[in-house]
Amino acid sequence: MNFRFLFFAFLFFTFYSCTPKNNLPTVAFVDAFEDATIGKAKQGFFDALKKNGFSEEQKTINVIYRNAQGSDITLNQIIQYCKTQQPTCIATCPTTPTIAALQNIKDIPVFMMVAPEPSLMKLNNKDGKAPANLFGVGENLGYIDTSFTLIQKLLSKKEKLKVGMIFNQSEPQSVDALQRIKSLATTMNIELVALPVNASADAQLVTQSLLAQQIDAFFANPDNVVFASFETIIKSCNNAKVPVFTSESGLVARGAVAAYGADMYQWGYQAGEQAAQYLKTKSTSNLHWEMVKLRKKVYNAKAAQTFGISIGEGFEEIVKLGGSE
């Protein structure tokens, strides 16, 4: 058997199958990795398209879907493939596909989701302007302040808190978030212990190193490594009886105590509504990237009970992954 032939046949099937063969608009959706939280944004995106009359079931659009499975090499191959296919638009989730798409594609609208504003991704030009083909929905770091202060409010019995976190030093927005949290921790008289991690495979070891320093709480910084390795993080923290706080509602559904931040499903839905407008009008003249609209305080009742944390008013209980739809 010619294994070299089979290998190239596999590549051909992976990247060149499902090529559109009709005149319908084509939406290419690029995911960075498999993740239950991030997956809610994809669901919201396609639900918004469907509500506006665009779906594969109705045979009103073609969809090219690719997932890089956490590989930067595969991600770059996917972006190049999308470029050759010239889809009507490209949807990207989360940060890394957005950056890769905008670095390589200038003539196709890119609708981002679960990504920071372009300045945090270092995408703005020297005049401070975002790429002309960037649309969709981003987020700034302001909501992290509210998320981080939840720790002190909900663990008020401690005189001085020691909070641990990991950060992805290869992601600009993760490093920027760390600097913001460092400044905030100093203001709040919180001792912050932060350790770098570059891959989800290292998350368990680094988390154990944090826990060995007797931290009172763990803050799940919103970056790709945390999303991809959260089950490992939450298991380690639960075993050490250390509560986890975050800024992402989807991570609360997966075991964190509380958060203030965007609902992933609604984030994707907001981006999908914008993409649907483009598909209807064939014009981007009235479109621009926009900030996420829906943020809320959420909590996990089981996690709060486990750690004896009393949740006050103004919080919505997360009862299933991704929050309300």
Image (cartoon, rainbow, N blue to C red):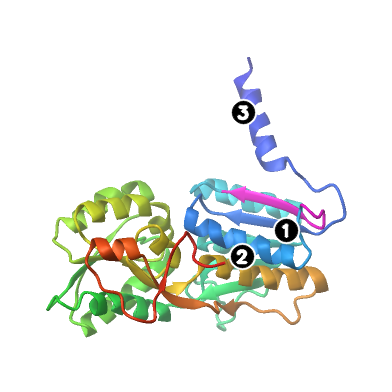
Q: Amino acid at mark 1?
A: Val
Crowd tier of the residue under label 3, counting other residues whose Cα lies within 10 Å: few below 14, some 14–19, many 20 or above: few
Foreground residue, 7 or 231? 231
Tell me the distance, in whole angstroms, between the alpha carbons under discs 3 and 1: 28 Å
Badge 2 element: helix
Mark 3 or mark 1, earlier in chain: 3
Foreground residue, 137 or 56? 56
Q: In the image, is residue 41 above or below residue 122?
A: above
- The residue to which callout 3 is attached is 7
Determine whether label 2 and label 1 are within 8 Å by CB: no
Image quadrant in which you'd find residue 127: bottom right
Q: In the image, is residue 165 above or below residue 150?
A: above
Q: In the image, is residue 99 above or below residue 270?
A: above
Badge 3 element: helix
Residue in the picture at 15% in, 55% down = 212
- The residue to which callout 2 is attached is 102
The N terminus lies in quadrant = top right
Q: Amino acid at mark 2?
A: Leu
Q: Position of residue 248 (x, y in %)?
A: 42, 67
Residue in the picture at 77% in, 62% down = 54
Residue in the picture at 64% in, 35% down = 11
Badge count:
3
Q: Position of residue 121 (x, y in %)?
A: 49, 70
- The residue to which callout 1 is attached is 27
Mark 3 or mark 2, earlier in chain: 3
Badge 1 element: strand
Crowd tier of the residue under label 1, counting other residues whose Cα lies within 10 Å: few below 14, some 14–19, many 20 or above: many
Q: Position of residue 39 (x, y in %)?
A: 54, 56
Q: Is residue 68 visible?
A: yes
Q: Is residue 282 visible?
A: no
Q: Tell me where the magenta segment starts and ends, as one range.
A: 57-67
Q: Amino acid at mark 3?
A: Phe
